[in-house]
Image (tube, rainbow, N blue to C red):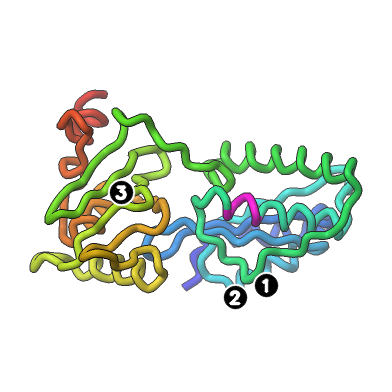
Amino acid sequence: MKRLSLLLSLLLLVACLSTQVYAETVYFLVGESEEGKQQVYIGESENCGERISQHNKNKDFWQYALVNISKTKFFTKAHGQYLEYYCIDQAQKAGRYALENGNSGKKTHVSEPVAADLLDNFEDIKVLCSALGYKIFDAMVRPVEKDILYCKGKGAVGKGQYGEDGFTVFKGSTCSIKYTNSCHKYSIAKREKMIEDGILQEKDGFYVLTEDYIFNSPSTAAMVVMAGNANGWITWKYKDGRTLDEVKRQGE
């Protein structure tokens, strides 16, 4: 099912008629999977309007398109490919979004002065994406010990942090294998998808998280750790015993 609203479809039509998108551009298609995982496709094109129209037909995950255009038409094809490659590399290192690219792009050769200019351009892209709410390139910073939240049950121990992006469960957290009898079908499907994708791997009687993973709510994060339904606002606790609810809701 196409997720673009009528308004976004009209904006896409306007963008495709703009002369600006017929220059070399770097663009980002952003959205999220049915499981709530943030996704991005990073591309470059000399005819961005036509390229995005093609993506609208054959890529179903995205809801918004961010387009980087040089007002002076500075970008050549080589510049676009260099930026595309670098953006993909930096997005992979940040690890916040699942990349929908089938490859890592093409690293083209550019002179050192041009490379420096393009890296400056990337910094602008990074800041603007973040300002718009898409932290594609922002590395996740681990909090100090007192700000880490814990979810424990049946021997499993999840560690994470709550932030404006959602709830992040840290790599290395352990999760119960056996589901509770009351576990919802959605919860089971969510975990099975994570197992299929290699995000949860079995080790020593538990599932272990192989990467930092952002959930859209504390309760979904707790469900994955506990293998059953849970109120994450109460289940996630700080080291001193206070619940997430007590600190973030009642404490405000």
| Amino acid type for the residue under numbered disc 1 | Gln
Q: Residue at x 47, y 41 (%)?
A: 140
Q: Residue furthest left?
A: 181
Disc 1 to disc 3, how far (Cα)?
Answer: 33 Å
* Residue 229 placement (x, y as % from top left): 16, 58
Disc 2 to disc 1, how far (Cα)?
Answer: 7 Å
Q: Quadrant of the C terminus?
A: top left
Q: Inspect the magenta stretch and tell me whether residue 90 lies in it.
A: yes
Q: Which residue is mark 3?
A: 217
Q: Residue at x 57, y 66 (%)?
A: 100
Q: Which residue is mark 1?
A: 54
Q: Is residue 193 visible?
A: yes
Q: Residue furthest bottom?
A: 58
Of residues 194 and 246, the one drawn nearer to the viewer in this rendering: 194
What SS does tag 2 mark? helix
Q: Residues within 10 Å of mark 1 (few under 14, many from 20)?
A: few
